[in-house]
Image (spheres, grey):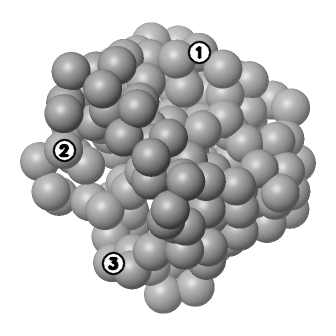
Amino acid sequence: MHIKKLVAAADHGGIELKDELVERLRDAGYEVEDLGTHSSDSVDYPDYAKLAGQSILEGKADCGILVCGTGIGISIAANKIDGIYCAKLNNPIEGKMAAAHNHANMVALGGRITDPETAWESVKAWLETEPEGDRHNRRVDKIKDLEGKR
């Protein structure tokens, strides 16, 4: 993937991990727009999934990272947005496969269940892996068919 700009967003359960990942991404040379949240006040994760998804669909970012307490709720919300393919990552192998096989343009992590090093290695694996074609294109196209996009 030729990533130029990422978007990052989290709810209150993912703010610390999101902030850590944003800092590491910027240190690695990525441009990252941090959509928040920026406090520990309770907020609703679907709102942040929507903000990040819209940013990608509008071409303001190439891909995105989402974080909530477990990564589950925010990934479900993101996957309701046509054109967003969000993979919930638990480890670097899943990060690699999310890019190579699933062509995910967004990933989600659990701020309360994923340590920063595992999260970083998972995100790096996703960002550094090129999407594979052939049978994987066929499968991703079938997902698009489910959305009515083809």
The answer to whether residue 44 is above or below residue 135 is above
Task: Using the image as rendered, state which of residue 126 and residue 133 is in the foreground.
Answer: 133
**Quick one: label 3 or label 2, which is nearer the N terminus?**
3
Q: Tell me which amino acid carries mark 1.
A: Gly
Residue for badge 3: 4
Compare marks 3 and 1 and give the one earlier in the sequence: 3
- Total marks shown come to 3
Q: Is 90 drawn above or below residue 74 in the view shown?
A: below
Quarter holding the C terminus is top left
Q: Mark 1 points at which residue?
A: 73
Residue at point 40%, 32% (across, down): 142
**Residue 35 falls in which quadrant of the image?**
top left
Q: Is residue 35 left or right of residue 87?
A: left
Q: What element carries label 3?
A: loop
Which quadrant of the view contains residue 83?
A: top left
Marker disc for residue 57: 2
Q: Position of residue 98 (x, y in %)?
A: 63, 51
Determine whether label 1 and label 2 are within 8 Å by CB. Answer: no
